[in-house]
C-alpha cells in the first residue's frame, strides 16, 4: 500500500495595511497603461514608508486594472480629485528622479503636438532603468546654478568646405561650454563617433547618449547628464529630451537629416521638439548643416533665425553626358590630373549592380508578373524580381519578344567595372551598403561610395566626382531637392583646398552656380516660392494616416462631414486613399499651422474612440520626413 503524501497547509500572505503619508499624501502620476485612451493623470495614495522617496520624476509601481505597471510621479498633493477609495503606490522602482518639472512639461507638450499618449514619449525620452546602475550612483540632490543674463543665440551655422564638420561643430561647442553645459544632437553613429574623436583630442569632457552604447551605460550617462556641469552631452535624436541642470545651448548637427525623425510612433522630429523646448527653457539653439532645410529656410526668410554663412568659392566643373555613358568624355582628363595629386572620390546614387532592366531593342522596362521591376544582382547574373525575387532564366521582352538586355540604372558594382576599365592600374575601394569604410589612406586611389558612406581621407580628396547628378534630384518624394542639395554641398567638405568638384550634370543646372558661390539661397527661395503658391509643407502642416484599407471609406466620409459641419477648419485638404500594399492604405491631409491644434485634437479623439471601441488602431504621422 502506497504511503500517502504529507498534507501541507496553504499559506496566504495578508495584504499590507498601508499607512497614508502625513504630508502631501497623494501622488499624481502618468501610468504606462499600454492602452491609447487611458492616457489621463491618475491619483495614488503615498504610503508613509515611501514618503521620502516619492518625488517628482521618480518611477514607481502601481496597480492598474489588476496589473502592476510602471508610473512616473508628476507631483505630490494634499487632496485628491477622486472621491472613492484610492489605491496605494506598491513599490519604488528607482529612487533616482529621471525627470524635472520642465522635462515633464516638454513631454506633455510633445504628446499634445503629435496627438499621442504621454507615455509613448516617455519611452523615447527616458532610458529604461538598470538596477545595477541605481546601486552604483547615489541619488543626486538638485543643483542650483546661478546664471547671469546673456543674449540667447538662435541661428543656423552653415558648415564649411574643405573642413571636417566635426571640427566646425566642436569650435561652436568650445565657445558655449564657457557658459554651461551643451547638448549636441547628431544624426547617426558615424557623426557621433567623429565628434567624440575630436572632443577627445581637444580634452573636452563629454557624455554619450545613443543606442550604440550598452543599456546600462546609457542609463548611467543619462543620470550623470542630469547633474553635470559645463559638460558636453552628445547623443542621437532621443537625447533631445535629456534634462540638464545648467544647460545653456542645444546644437542640432546636420538638422535636415532624416535620422532626426523618430521612426516609432508617434514620429516626432528633433527640430520641432527643440523649438518647443525653447518655450520652456532659456537656452540658445544652433542648427548646423551644409544647406538649411525648408523649415529652417522659412525662419531665415522671415528674420526669425540668423543665418551664419561663410564667404568662399569652390572649383566646380560640370560635364553633361549626351549619349547616356557613365563618364562624360571631357571628364577623363580632369580625373587623371587629380589622381596625380591624391585620391578621387566617385559618388553614385545607387548601390547594387543593375537596378533597372530594359529591353535593348524597344527600351521597355522589364517587369515581373507581380508588377515589380526586374533587376540584375551581379555580373553575368540572371534577372530577378526586386520584390518577390522570382528568377527569369530565359528572360524575353514581353513587348517585342527579344532577349537582349540593357541596364538603364547602374548600381555601384556595375559602375566599378566601367571605371576600372577607364583607369586601369589604379587601386579601387568601394564603400556602400554593409561594406562601409570609415577612412582610407592618402594616395592615388579611386574610392566609389554611395550617399552616407563616404570615407574620410586625411587632407581631403584631390577631386570628387558626382556621377549621374540628375538622379539625385529625381526621387519622387518632397524632400528629394533638399536631400540632393545637402549631399552636393557636403561633397565639397571632402575636397582638398585646391581640389575640384566634378559634376556629371548639365552646366546650366542651378546647383552648379550655387556650389561655386557656396550660397544655396537662390535655390531655396525658388522652391519656397513654388511651395507657397500651391501650398505645400512647410507652409502647411501635413498629417498622414495609414491603416487597413477597409477602414478608409468610413474614415474619409467622417472627415468630410466634420469639415462640412465646421467641426474641422475649411482649409483642411484631404488626399487619398492610396494603396500602400498588404491590404493597407493611407490618406494625407494638409492644414494651416494656425488651425493645427483643432485638427490634432480631432484626430486624437478619433484614436481614443477607436481604442474605446477596441477597433484596430490607425497610424498617425504629423509632419513626417517623407509623405
Image (cartoon, rainbow, N blue to C red):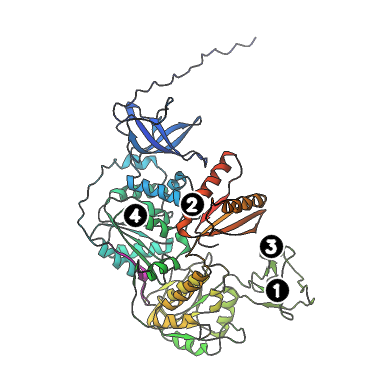
Q: x%, y% of residue 245? A: 28, 50
Q: Where does label 3 land, which residue?
A: 389
Q: Secondary structure at mark 4?
A: loop
Q: Secondary structure at mark 2?
A: helix
Q: Earlier in the sequence, mark 3 or mark 4?
A: 4
10 Å neighbourhood of mark 2: few (<14), some, or many (≥20)? Answer: some
Q: Quadrant of the C terminus?
A: bottom right
Q: x%, y% of residue 327? A: 56, 84
Q: Where does label 4 land, which residue?
A: 279
Q: Earlier in the sequence, mark 1 or mark 4?
A: 4
Q: Residue at x 32, y 30 (%)?
A: 78
Look at discs 3 and 2 and give the one toward the viewer. Answer: 2
Q: Where does label 1 land, which residue?
A: 365
Q: Earlier in the sequence, mark 3 or mark 1?
A: 1
* Residue 100 in view (yes/no): no
Q: Where does label 2 land, which residue?
A: 598
10 Å neighbourhood of mark 1: few (<14), some, or many (≥20)? Answer: some
10 Å neighbourhood of mark 3: few (<14), some, or many (≥20)? Answer: few
Q: Do callouts 3 and 4 mark residues in contact (Cβ within 8 Å)?
A: no
Task: Give the spatial CA distance, label 3 vs label 4.
Answer: 51 Å
Amino acid at each position: 500500500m502506497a504511503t500517502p503524501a504529507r498534507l501541507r497547509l496553504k499559506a496566504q500572505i495578508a495584504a499590507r495595511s498601508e499607512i497614508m503619508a502625513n504630508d502631501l499624501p497623494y501622488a499624481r502620476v502618468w501610468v504606462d497603461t499600454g492602452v491609447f485612451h487611458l492616457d489621463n493623470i491618475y491619483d495614488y495614495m503615498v504610503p508613509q514608508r515611501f514618503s521620502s522617496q516619492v518625488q517628482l520624476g521618480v518611477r514607481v509601481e502601481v496597480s492598474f486594472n489588476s496589473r502592476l505597471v510602471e508610473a512616473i510621479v508628476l507631483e505630490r498633493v494634499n487632496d485628491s480629485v477622486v472621491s472613492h477609495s484610492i489605491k496605494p503606490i506598491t513599490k519604488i522602482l528607482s529612487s533616482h528622479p529621471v525627470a524635472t518639472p520642465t522635462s515633464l512639461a516638454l513631454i506633455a507638450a510633445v504628446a499634445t503636438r503629435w496627438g499621442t499618449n504621454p507615455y509613448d514619449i516617455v519611452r523615447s525620452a527616458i532610458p529604461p532603468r538598470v538596477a545595477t546602475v541605481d546601486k552604483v550612483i547615489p541619488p543626486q540632490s538638485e543643483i542650483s546654478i546661478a546664471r547671469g543674463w546673456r543674449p540667447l543665440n538662435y541661428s543656423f551655422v552653415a558648415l564649411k568646405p574643405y573642413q571636417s564638420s566635426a571640427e566646425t561643430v566642436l569650435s561652436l561647442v568650445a565657445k558655449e561650454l564657457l557658459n554651461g553645459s551643451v547638448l549636441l544632437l547628431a544624426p547617426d553613429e558615424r557623426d557621433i563617433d567623429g565628434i567624440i574623436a575630436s572632443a577627445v583630442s581637444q580634452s573636452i569632457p563629454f557624455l554619450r547618449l545613443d543606442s550604440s552604447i550598452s543599456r546600462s551605460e546609457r542609463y548611467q550617462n543619462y543620470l550623470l547628464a542630469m547633474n553635470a556641469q559645463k559638460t558636453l552631452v552628445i547623443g542621437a535624436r532621443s537625447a533631445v529630451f535629456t534634462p540638464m541642470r545648467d544647460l545653456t545651448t542645444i546644437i542640432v548637427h546636420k538638422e535636415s537629416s532624416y535620422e532626426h525623425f523618430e521612426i516609432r510612433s508617434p514620429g516626432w522630429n528633433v527640430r520641432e521638439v527643440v523649438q518647443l523646448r525653447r518655450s520652456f527653457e532659456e537656452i540658445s539653439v544652433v542648427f548646423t548643416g551644409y544647406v538649411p532645410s525648408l523649415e529652417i529656410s522659412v525662419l531665415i526668410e522671415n528674420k526669425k533665425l540668423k543665418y551664419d554663412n561663410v564667404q568662399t568659392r569652390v572649383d566646380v566643373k560640370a560635364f553633361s553626358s549626351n549619349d547616356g555613358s557613365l563618364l562624360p568624355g571631357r571628364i577623363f582628363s580632369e580625373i587623371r590630373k587629380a589622381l596625380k595629386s591624391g585620391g578621387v572620390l566617385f559618388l553614385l546614387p545607387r548601390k547594387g549592380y543593375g537596378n533597372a532592366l530594359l529591353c535593348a531593342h524597344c527600351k521597355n522596362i522589364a517587369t515581373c508578373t507581380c508588377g515589380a521591376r526586374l533587376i540584375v544582382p551581379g555580373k553575368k547574373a540572371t534577372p530577378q524580381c526586386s520584390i518577390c525575387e522570382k528568377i527569369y532564366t530565359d528572360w524575353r521582352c514581353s513587348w517585342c519578344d527579344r532577349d537582349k538586355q540593357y541596364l538603364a540604372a547602374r548600381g555601384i558594382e556595375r559602375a566599378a567595372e566601367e571605371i576600372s576599365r577607364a583607369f586601369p592600374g589604379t587601386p579601387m575601394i568601394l564603400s556602400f551598403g554593409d561594406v562601409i569604410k570609415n577612412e582610407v589612406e592618402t594616395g592615388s586611389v579611386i574610392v566609389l561610395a554611395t550617399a552616407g558612406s563616404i570615407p574620410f581621407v586625411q587632407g581631403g580628396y584631390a577631386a570628387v566626382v558626382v556621377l549621374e547628378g540628375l538622379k539625385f534630384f529625381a526621387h519622387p518624394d518632397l524632400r528629394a531637392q533638399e536631400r540632393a542639395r545637402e549631399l552636393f554641398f557636403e561633397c565639397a567638405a571632402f575636397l582638398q583646398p585646391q581640389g575640384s568638384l566634378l559634376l556629371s550634370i548639365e552646366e546650366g543646372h542651378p546647383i552648379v552656380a550655387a556650389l561655386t558661390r557656396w550660397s544655396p539661397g537662390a535655390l531655396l527661395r525658388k522652391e519656397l516660392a513654388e511651395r507657397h503658391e500651391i501650398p505645400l509643407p512647410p507652409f502647411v502642416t501635413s498629417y498622414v494616416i495609414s491603416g487597413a484599407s477597409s477602414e478608409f471609406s468610413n474614415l474619409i466620409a467622417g472627415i468630410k462631414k466634420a469639415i462640412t459641419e465646421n467641426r474641422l477648419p475649411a482649409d483642411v485638404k484631404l488626399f487619398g486613399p492610396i494603396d500602400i500594399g498588404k491590404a493597407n492604405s493611407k490618406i494625407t491631409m494638409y492644414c494651416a499651422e494656425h488651425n493645427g491644434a483643432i485638427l490634432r485634437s480631432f484626430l486624437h479623439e478619433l484614436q481614443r474612440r477607436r481604442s474605446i471601441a477596441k477597433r484596430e488602431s490607425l497610424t498617425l504621422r504629423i509632419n513626417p520626413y517623407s509623405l
